[in-house]
Amino acid sequence: MKPPAAEKPKLVKTAELPLPKPVRPGSIPQLLRGMKDILPVDAFYWKNVREKFEELAEFFGYMPIETPIMEPRDLFVRGVGKQTDIVEKEMYTFVDQGGESIALRPEMTASIARAYIGHGMVNMPQPLKFFYFGPAFRHDRPQAGRYRQFHQAGFEAVGDAHPIVDAELISMAWAFFKDLNLPVTIQLNSIGCTVCRGAYKSKLVDYYKTKKGALCAACRERLTRSPLRLLDCKEPGCEAIKEGAPQMFDHLDEACHNHFFKVVEYLDDLNLPYALNPHIVRGLDYYNRTVFEIWPEAAPSAVQQASAEGSAPVETEENKPSTPAQSSLGGGGRYDGLVEALGGRPTPAAGFAIGLERVILLLKAKNPAPADGKATQVFLAQLGEAARRKALVLLHALRSELKVASALYKDGLKPQLEIANRLGARYTVIIGQKEVLDDTAIVRDMEAGMQEVVPFGKVAVDLKRRFGIVETSPSPSVGGERKESDTT
Ligand code: HAM
């Protein structure tokens, strides 16, 4: 007899989906709770932080990789762990039009492991080092620095079990914050391997059972479902209990102990500010041996964070003060079993990811008005349609070497000069009707208040010379015949 066909997931047309809340006709669509617009005013912070990551990745030989935002739900169930908060409570999932169960990625490590297996990277020289930057999604309770869409930058080294890989990764995370002048501490632990952790878990459960009456409801559940997470509880009553709990350090088997000892030795050589913290267990199931988190040296207060966000510093549920652990800036560790758990060959690996929003909140609290990148060097002002056309051509001729600004859509000279002043342009090029007829332009030195008339075809060379940019090949004529300089 044929086995019964697997039940196909029921398809729901988007148009048939119920609207969870009635929408008032004509109302303005609102940002979803826990989501955030990244506005131009913050662009400098994002660019700066991204560049720092890219420099770090290049220096340590991590290659850029991008994986999709949507993945099969099963990837995270198997990768991150069925019983983790992330998979059980926080993952955005849906069934698509083809009946596939999809998740918006809550993190990227499982995706990297999937890509590593799927593209046969096991056959390439190991380890493979990946760097990524992008959004992730978790339906968590929003708080200051905790969003439902947030961005991570991450580094994964797949294919090498040596403890120097762990230490190098930790040193990279530390170097990132050092370069940004943000004081952090590295919270370090080892959670051993499946074998020694198994024995440790039994001891932990025995200890906690004696305190069961004093545990919070979540911890009573953790006792049977995920005992290691007992060590992660932030409830005041449970905090006190965990101080007396047995520690994993004392239960590592010889190989795990030696591995951890080596990592610590390497970090000591670098003088890194790490703290051994037996309560770092991480919220994802794939870790083994080394685990770590990056905490701000002092957790930013809600008020500091809210004012960095540009909002009124009123304390609400959503911006209530966070403990260092809650505002962990980054975290990672070794995950030697993940590739195998997803169907690949046994492959050691380690990595970490940093939460961008949290880094930027700290940077903003520290330096609320950063100087924008490169200052405007030249402003192009024009008067009349023919001048506008010439200014557009000149703009492109200068683009590759100078920081040039313009307001070609403006008609009057006055508003354009005001913009030039506001931007602090060193020179303003003015093309008016007379200049169009003469095929010239006025180059005004904004500091000295002097100006010269320059043949239009020589303006680009003239400006570059003023900024000390030496022409290596004859500059192409810009928008007209070349004439000898007749500057006055
Ligand atoms: P994770 O600790 O879950 O680790 O996340 C890393 C960082 O992402 C956190 O330390 C935090 O800065 C940021 N983050 C997490 N959730 C949120 C949120 N809701 N809002 C804002 N920021 C958040 C991982 O995701 C692992 N994949 C890291 C890793 C890479 N392990 C090995 N390789």
Image (cartoon, grey):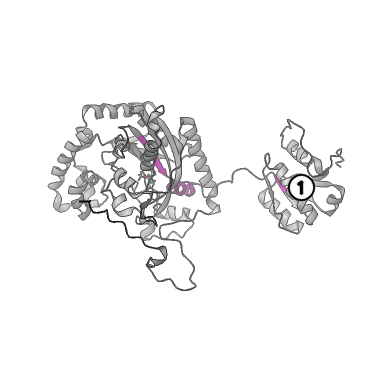
Left/right of residue 142 with respect to residue 206 in the rendered view: right
Q: Is residue 296 visible?
A: no
**Outermost residue toward the front in this view:** 1
Q: Is residue 358 left or right of residue 455?
A: left
Please report the residue visible at 46 percent of the width from the left and 30 percent of the height from the top.
Answer: 61
Residue at x 47% of width, y 53% of height = 308
Describe the element under mark 1 as helix, strand or loop: strand
Residue displayed at 86% across by 52% down: 434
Q: Percent from the top left, x then y, of residue 265?
A: 33, 26
x and y percentages locating residue 183 in the rendered image: 42, 40
Say whether residue 485 is magenta.
no
Residue 24 image point, x, y percent: 44, 73
Residue 294, relative to residue 17: is it above or below? above
Is 460 placed above or below 473 here? below
Q: Percent x, y for residue 39?
A: 53, 54
The CB of the residue at mark 1 lies under 8 Å from ligand 1: no
The magenta segment is 350-379
Circle 1 packing at 10 Å, graded few (<14), some (14-19), many (20+), is many
Above or below, comparing residue 443 to residue 465 in the picture: below
Quadrant in the rendering for residue 339: top left
Inspect this view and state whether residue 74 appears.
yes
Q: Is 367 in the magenta?
A: yes
Disc 1 residue type? Val
Image quarter of residue 452: top right
* Residue positioned most to the bottom: 25
Disc 1 marks which residue? 429
